[in-house]
Amino acid sequence: MKKADDAGSDQFRSIAELLSSTYPEIPTHLINQIHLTRHGPGCWDWGGYLRDNGYGQKWKDGRLTGSHRASFEYLNGPIPEGLDLDHLCRNHGCINPAHLEPVTRRENNLRGLLTHINKSRSAMRTTCRHGHPLTPENTRHYKGRRLCRHCARDRYYQIKREEKQNGQVA
Ligand SMILES: [Zn+2]
Ligand SMILES: [Zn+2]
C-alpha cells in the first residue's frame, strides 16, 4: 500500500514538472494542487477545496473563484463577461484549460442537462444494446458503467474463432 502511494507521488511530481514546462504561464502553486487524473484522459483533477457541485475553488487576486476559471485565465486572459466555462470532459473538478470552453450560461446549462438525461437513460435501460437482460448476474460494473457479461463472452469466443481461422490459413 505504502509502495503504491510512493509511486503515485513520483508520477505526480513528474507530471507537475511537465505541466510547468509546457505551461510556464500557469503558476507553480496552482500546478502543485493538481492531482493525478482519476477521470477522463488528460484531466487535471483539482486537489484543493471542492464545492458541493464538484467545482474547485481558489483565491485569485483577493477573491474566491473557480479553480478551473483561474487556470483558464492564466493561459487565455480574462473570460468575457457573461460567459461560463463548459467542461468538455464533463469532470467538474478538472482544471485543464484544454478541456474548457467559454459558452453562454444558457448553453452550458443545456449541455449539462443533456448529459444528465443521457446518464439517466442508460441507468434505466434493462437490456444491453443486443437485447440481453441486464440482471445482476449478467452485469459487470466498470467505471460507473454497466457492461453485459453475455456480450463480453461472445466477443471473447469471436476473437478465439478468428485466431483459430487465421492459424489454419497460415
Ligand atoms: Zn478534464
Ligand atoms: Zn449483451
Image (spheres, grey):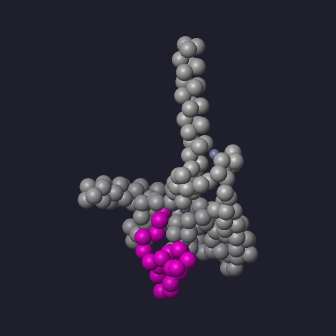
Q: Is residue 3 above or below residue 162?
A: below
Q: Is residue 140 above or below residue 35?
A: above
Q: Residue at x 55, y 35 (%)?
A: 156
Q: Residue at x 57, y 42 (%)?
A: 152
Q: Is residue 87 above or below residue 53?
A: above
- Give coordinates of residue 89: x percent, y percent: 59, 61
Figure quadrant of residue 19: bottom left
Q: Residue at x 56, y 32 (%)?
A: 157
- Give coordinates of residue 158: x percent, y percent: 59, 31
Q: Which stretch did the figure color magenta?
A: 44-66
Residue closer to the observer: 53 or 166 = 166
- Quadrant including the N terminus: bottom left
Q: Residue at x 62, y 53 (%)?
A: 134
Is 159 covered by the magenta stretch? Answer: no
- Give coordinates of residue 3: x percent, y percent: 26, 55
Q: Is residue 98 above or below residue 64?
A: above
Q: Is residue 97 found left or right of 1 in the rendered image?
A: right
Q: Residue extending furthest bottom?
A: 62
- Quadrant including the C terminus: top right
Q: Is residue 80 found left or right of 2 in the rendered image?
A: right
Q: Is residue 65 found left or right of 128 in the rendered image?
A: left
Q: Is residue 156 visible?
A: yes
Q: Is residue 71 found left or right of 7 in the rendered image?
A: right
Q: Is residue 28 visible?
A: no
- Give coordinates of residue 145: x percent, y percent: 57, 56
Give the total number of marks visible in the rendering: 0
